Amino acid sequence: MKYLSLGYNTNGELSTVTGLEKGNLSKYLSVLEETHIVKYVLPLGQRKRGIYVLNDPFFNFWFRFVYPNLSDLEMGLIDDVFSRISKDLI
């Protein structure tokens, strides 16, 4: 889910960045779709070349902003983290 929040949203991109084979990756994505955490979006009028997006805003925020800065947040460097991510929040 980390990579989905970073913009890797096709099956090929996710397979490359995670190192998982496309068959195994499809199983994981299917489970995430069933739980409504991830959604597969098709372009209007097409049956192929869709993208995966995080359907839950909380997960998207967590994996995009909190998870990469978790150690700094745990050390109490909240202002430093906020200054780094504030440009991407809007």
Image (tube, rainbow, N blue to C red):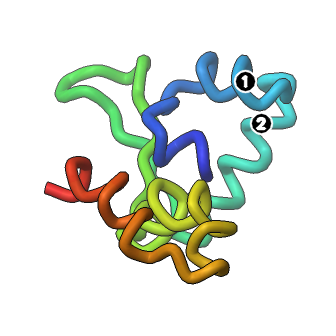
| Marked residue nearer the N-terminal end (2 or 1) | 1
Q: Residue at x 18, y 28 (%)?
A: 44
Q: Would residue 37 be found to the left or right of residue 72 on screen?
A: left
Residues at circles 2 and 1 in contact by the CB criterion of under 8 Å: yes
Q: Residue at x 42, y 19 (%)?
A: 48
The amino acid type, in three-letter code, at marker 2 is Leu
In the image, residue 3 lies at what x, y percent? Answer: 59, 40
Q: Residues within 10 Å of mark 2 (few under 14, many from 20)?
A: some
Look at the image and tell me in which quarter the C terminus lies: bottom left
Q: Residue at x 24, y 58 (%)?
A: 86
Q: Residue at x 35, y 40 (%)?
A: 41
Q: Secondary structure at mark 2?
A: helix
Total marks shown come to: 2
The relative height of residue 72 versus residue 8 in the rendered view (above or below) is: below
Instruction: Report the residue marked by disc 1.
Output: 15
In the image, residue 26 lies at what x, y percent? Answer: 73, 37
Instruction: Report the residue marked by disc 2.
Output: 25
Q: Would residue 25 be found to the left or right of residue 80 on screen?
A: right
The amino acid type, in three-letter code, at marker 1 is Ser
Image quarter of residue 72? bottom right
Image quarter of residue 74? bottom right
Q: Secondary structure at mark 1?
A: helix
